Amino acid sequence: MVRLNEVRPGELAITLPERPDAEVYFIGTIRTPWTDRLTCPRQGRTDGPTCRIELRPPFDKGLDSIAEFARLEVLYWLHQSRRDLALQSPRSDGNARGVFSLRTPVRPNPIATSIVQLLKVEGPVLFVRGLDCLDGTPLVDLKPDRTLFEPLAPAQAGDFQIGDAS
Amino acid sequence: MVRLNEVRPGELAITLPERPDAEVYFIGTIRTPWTDRLTCPRQGRTDGPTCRIELRPPFDKGLDSIAEFARLEVLYWLHQSRRDLALQSPRSDGNARGVFSLRTPVRPNPIATSIVQLLKVEGPVLFVRGLDCLDGTPLVDLKPDRTLFEPLAPAQAGDFQIGDAS
């Protein structure tokens, strides 16, 4: 069962810094069939249900040319997750692991990434498969899948740098 | 050449919302050979130079078990990027595309994702290959590469949901 707000045996809660370091804009909202964390998939699947990604103005202006890509990387904000558990016990069995060795929604910066199949684009709305999040989850970013994208900008020196200088 | 602060022909600057929606903690700092945006690689490469990812306390507590993974997904904050260009012209040739069809550092939420090879872990420091960012770039998150990770938590109903209800 997913976590609601409990701290389980073996887990470690840390004290988060008093002040944050940067700020995020929610650029849209994700619509999925899941309204309860207890029924959400743990990970998206490419044959999963169709979900909608709705951009809000003025960010919808950035969707130009996106239909060229069959797959997108989606970043979203897991707005119901606590942020302070550095060690977590996914099975509630006393065995805990570091948050950075898990893809748990509970993390210092609750940002998830998924790769989705892009089915169609209608104005500011994308129809996709492969998401795993709650209905109403805030959208943070969209990018072409890295395996489908080649930079358009001219090359730079670092592009050719391999290994380590001795 | 990468953008410094110019707006190029064909590009569209939008007015960002007055207030942000969420806040990010910088959980560490990335050390790379690149100190100037004009020499950074456009994308990381698996045979590129060794870079260091230095976690800051108390977030280093979350590194437990991370050495099990040969590849990690790294999220970082592109702190020198402007955020308001919805249409961009990577070649400065008058042709512009939406920001979400590019992997440009200039985006409403300047968060990059890379897949890196994990070489070793020494206390709060990871040694990796595959990054493309400036020395001093703030770290936002680390996750196991999605292709290497299986959820440990018990299954939920959504895990088995395919297609669309009619």
Image (cartoon, coloured by chain):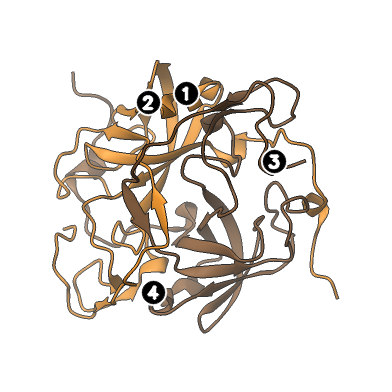
Chain colours: A orange, B brown
Mark 2 and mark 1 on one chain: yes
Q: CA distance from mark 2 to mark 4?
A: 37 Å
Question: Would you identify the image quadrant in which residue B158 lies?
Answer: top left
Chain at tag 2: A
Of residue A94 and residue B121, the one placed in the foreground of this image is B121
| Residue denoted by label 2 | A57
Element assignment for label 2: loop
| Residue denoted by label 1 | A61
| Residue denoted by label 3 | B3
Horizontal and vertical percent for residue B44?
68, 53
Element assignment for label 4: helix
In the image, what residue occupies the spot 56% across and 65% down? B70
Which of the two marks, 4 or 3, is nearer to us in this view?
3
Q: Residue furthest front?
A: B18
Chain at tag 4: B
**Which three-letter amino acid code belongs to the residue tagged 3?**
Arg
Few, some or many C-alpha atoms within 10 Å of disc 4 (few <14, some 14-19, many ≥20)? many
Marks 4,3: beta carbons within 8 A:
no
Q: CA distance from mark 1 to mark 3?
A: 20 Å
Marks 2,1: beta carbons within 8 A:
yes
